[in-house]
Each structure stands twice: as C-alpha cells, then as structure tokens.
Image (cartoon, helix red, strand yellow):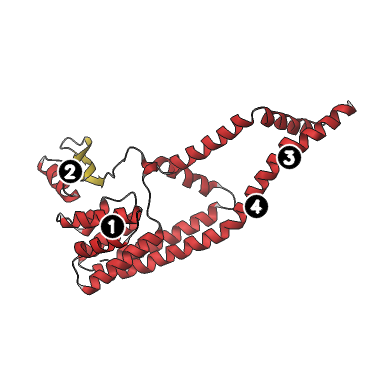
Amino acid sequence: MPHYRYKAVDAAGQAVTGTMDEASARRVTAVLEEKGLQVSSVEAVAPGGMFPFRHTRLTWEDVEFLNSQLIALTRSGLPLAPALEAIGRELRRGSLKTVVDDLQATLNSGSSLTEALERHRGAVPPVYIAAIRAGEETGNLPAILELCAEYTSQMVALKTRLREAMTYPVVVLIAMGMMLVYLLNYTIPQFAEVFDDFGARLPAITMFWIGISEFTRQKFGFVVMTLCGAIVLFVVAGRTRQGRYASDWLRLKLWGVGHAFNSASMARFCRSLGVLLSGK
C-alpha cells in the first residue's frame, strides 16, 4: 500500500506531522479530516525515501515520451491501465519502466492519474503533476496534455542547448585540472631543485607554489580522497531540499552566472504558470 507523509493542524492550532499507509492521498486527507485535523499537505513517500540520492529522477526526455503516450491514449479513448501495461512491456529496465508499471498498478486499484503520479513526485517533475491535476479537476486533460507536450519539448531543447554550451567549458576545466596536477607533481619540483642550488631567497608567491607542490606530492592520496568526498557530498546534498536551496542561492550570487540563472528560472516559471492557468 502507498506510504504518505502529511502535515496538518489540530483544533488548538498545533502543527501535526506523520505518515500513513492508505490507498490514495485523498483517502489520507479524508481520514485526517475525520479526526478533526485541517490538512495542509499530503506527499507520497517513494520507497527508500530515507536515502533520496538512491531515487533516480526521470529525464525530460522520459517525461516527453510518457506525455506523448498519454496523449495518444486519451485521443483513442482506450483505458489507461491496460494500455500502460502494454507500454511497460515494451520498455527496458529503468526508471521510466518502473514509473509506468507502478502507474498501471495504481490505476488498476481505482486511483486517479494524479494520485498515481503523486507516488513518484521525486521522479516526475512537480509542475507536470500539478498540470495533470488541473486537467483532471477541470475535465480538460487532453488539452493540458497538449500544452505539456509543448512544455516538455521546450525543456528538452533547453537541456540540449545547455549541454552543448557547457561542453567546451567542462573540457577546458578538465584540461586545466590535468595541467595543474602535472605542474604540481613534476614541473615545480624540478624548478625547486634548481632554486635550491641558487641559495637565494625566493619570492613569497614562488614559495607558496613550492609548498603546495610538496604538500600534494606527500599527501596525494589524502587530496584525492578529499576531492572525491567533496564531490559525493555535493551530489548527495543536491538531492535534498536544503541542498537545492543552497545550490540555487550560490548560483544567484555568482558573478556572471546569477543573472542568467535568474532569467532562465523566471522564464521556466512563466511557462509553468501558463500551463497551469490553461487548465482552468
């Protein structure tokens, strides 16, 4: 049975949080309201929720494929659950197949498409789930799916352009890193031996780089492990809410990047809001 995390307020105005196993988010809300609680949010907890970095998100290409299949199904008038079962059989192992198979099982249990997608909020973009909810509540699901098709295609195109734009800087940074490692471990030590033969006092900047070179050569394993640990910590933190807030704050504050990031975020927000408002 699906597992949900809820937030509510009791009659005394005190916040109440907890988890509950129920068939759907609506059922969780109904049970809590029967207890006299005012529900503020109900979120599906994916399996392995204690380790968010183990949960794989769907790519925008996957979302685009799923949305195109839903458009074809709504146009044809076929039942969603059996059709999704057939689609799942054609997919290879992966996050998309897991989501499609679970959608089919959840729809067979009597839940709505929104409730089925809510179970994968960590994998499916929240804006897509919100758009589907708006379409179901207004009875305008086919039109919303068409708008989502345009939205997902734009996101795929944006992702492609960003990947192409970032390829050159990433290659340059990798080359610079490799060059720096070579200089610290091979070139600078050779110059340090020459400087020792002079017996003269060296400038502070020269002594600094010689010191860095000696440290990296003596503690090379420690430096590598520290860098790897920092990368893993950054990736894991980026999968948490607090980590995403910190990452976004850093992007907004970086000179030369903050303005572009802010403009891209505002454009995406406007497109998302347009999709949601169209569902009315």
Q: How far apart are marks 1 and 2 (CA)?
A: 33 Å
Residues at discs 4 and 1 in contact (Cβ within 8 Å): no
Q: Name the image quarter holding residue 221.
A: top right
| 215 sits to left or right of 43 | right
Residue at the image point whose x is 19% and y is 49% from the top: 25
| 144 sits to left or right of 225 | left
Kind of residue at badge 3: Leu
Residue 228 x, y percent position in the rendering: 54, 37
| 150 sits to left or right of 32 | right
Q: Specify the label residue 100 is tagged with.
A: 1
Residue under label 3: 183
Q: Nearer the viewer, mark 2 or mark 3?
A: 3
Q: Sort mark 2 into few (<14), some (14-19) or many (20+) by Cα contacts within 10 Å.
A: some
Residue under label 4: 172
Q: Can residue 201 be seen in this view?
A: no
Judged from the image, the secondary structure of the residue bearing numbered disc 3 is: helix
Judged from the image, the secondary structure of the residue bearing numbered disc 2 is: strand
**Position of 106 relative to 35 (above/below):** below
Residues at discs 2 and 3 in contact (Cβ within 8 Å): no
Kind of residue at badge 4: Val
Q: How far apart are marks 2 and 3 (CA)?
A: 64 Å
